[in-house]
Image (cartoon, helix red, strand yellow):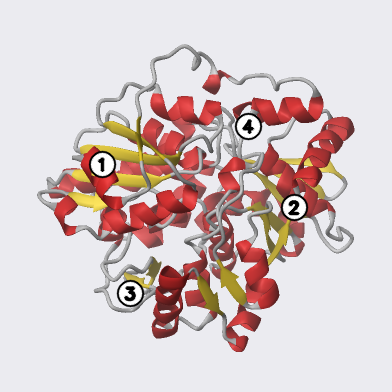
Amino acid sequence: MSSPISYVSTRGRAPAADFAEALLTGVAPDGGLYAPSRWPQLGAGAMADDPAERARAVLEPFVGASLPEGALDRAARRLVETFDTEELTPLVEVAPGLFVLELFHGPTAAFKDYAMQMAAVLAEAALAASGERLLLITATSGDTGAAAVRAFGGIEGVDLVVLHPLGRVSPVQRLQMTTTGASNVLNLAVRGDFDDCQRLVKALLTDDGLRAGRRLSSVNSINWARLAGQIPYYVGAAKALGEAAGRATYVVPTGNFGDAFAGWAARRMGLPMGGLVAATNRNDALVRGLDTGVYERTQAEPTASVSMDVQAPSNFERLVFEASGRDADLTRGLFEDFARTGRMALPGDLLAALRREVSAVAVSEAETVEEIRRTHAGSGRVICPHTAVALHAARRLDRSSGPVVALSTAHAAKFPESVEAALGFEPEQPHQLAGLEGRVERFETVDPKLDAVKAAIG
């Protein structure tokens, strides 16, 4: 029998944790990100016909015995209760050999719902077992905040603080966060960009003063439980592809690199898969890093694909840790340098290893608009700008040797202005987004300073 999986820090100076501890802590005490002590291999249950059973089977070895019995089953069934399609994340062929993995059928019409709905159930179970209270702090470029508010709003024992960049999320995304009326949710609009929000969250998570009398964690994909919850839909895509799965290339629209790393994790667990491509907009720090060996943060520029306006994707740290052979000293040194200077030079052997694991391409604003128009003209489908980034990158790839799958991460109606600018009409609104306009909003505006955010939290 295999030993239970524990969780180690990418920076190597924190005690190992079990799943419940990693879930309720988010970031390791040394500032690193948690990674499983070993990678389990997918069992037969991962290919079950029932998508909820697939999710349970994928996550079971990660959770182990750290949560009360039945918690994982309840979390997996929550997907069936909250998603509006039987398959949850259907795979649709839009051109010969070109597929879209639809991840927007959850309660907030974005891919974050899949893992977030399960994480809320698991966190509630962990808190019930420990009797503790949890302060959740999350940064969002749009979709994470909405999904977190929907999943955790009203949960006993949880206080949720959401930081979003002022004026840099779509109006629909903002309304989803700020109009629920949930008494346990505080929305903060930060005068800055997503990287400012993420920097503040990381600082808050290591602030001992905020921990007084409660747990402190995050539901960004820096939280291992949140990221692990995204692995199952890659398994579902492989099941749908059948024999072609081992030749498939996945193209992932990338902001914080969490969804892309979930694909990497699926492959590491034995899922048949060909290539993995991270597609960015003009905020292309990841592309430049893999191209030149210099990973450098610059000011994030606003784009139509607002949820990807990120210049310092946190989950790149997990990829560096794995590609370096789990060299925690090297990883710690690189990311401490990056925190101080906004720049790191990747050693040659590490750069070569990273390039073997994943490739990255940037898609321009003009190409994003072009793809929205092309997809609508060719298939009648209306896609969001993030999906358009992935599809444009996917069309560049050779499909003669295997299928190409672009991840469709949000419903187009969450970005009506961008779609109307491209197509001349607004997309049809799904039921998840109905009735948002006219509701009372609740949020506070703060400067991108730690003291200002702490004062708002109280």
Tell me the element at label 4: loop
- Near mark 4 (Cα within 10 A), the count class, few <14, some 14-19 or many ≥20, is many
Looking at marks 4 and 3 on the same chain, the residue that comes earlier in the sequence is marked by 3
Q: Position of residue 137 (x, y in %)?
A: 31, 46
Residue sitting at 52 percent across and 32 percent down?
Answer: 106
Q: Which of the pair 384/247 is nearer the observer?
A: 384
The single residue placed furthest to the left in the displayed view is 213
Q: Amino acid at mark 2?
A: Val
Tell me the residue that label 4 is attached to: 411
Q: Amino acid at mark 1?
A: Glu
What label sits on residue 124 in the rendered view?
Answer: 1
- Position of 108 with respect to 281 (left or right) is left
Quarter holding residue 92: top right
Tell me the element at label 3: loop
Tell me the residue that label 2 is attached to: 363
Residue sitting at 47 percent across and 69 percent down?
Answer: 317
Mark 1 → mark 4, Cα distance in angstroms:
28 Å
Looking at marks 1 and 2 on the same chain, the residue that comes earlier in the sequence is marked by 1
Looking at marks 2 and 3 on the same chain, the residue that comes earlier in the sequence is marked by 3
Image quadrant in which the C terminus is located = top left
Tell me the residue that label 3 is attached to: 3
Tell me the element at label 1: helix
Looking at marks 2 and 4 on the same chain, the residue that comes earlier in the sequence is marked by 2
- Near mark 3 (Cα within 10 A), the count class, few <14, some 14-19 or many ≥20, is few
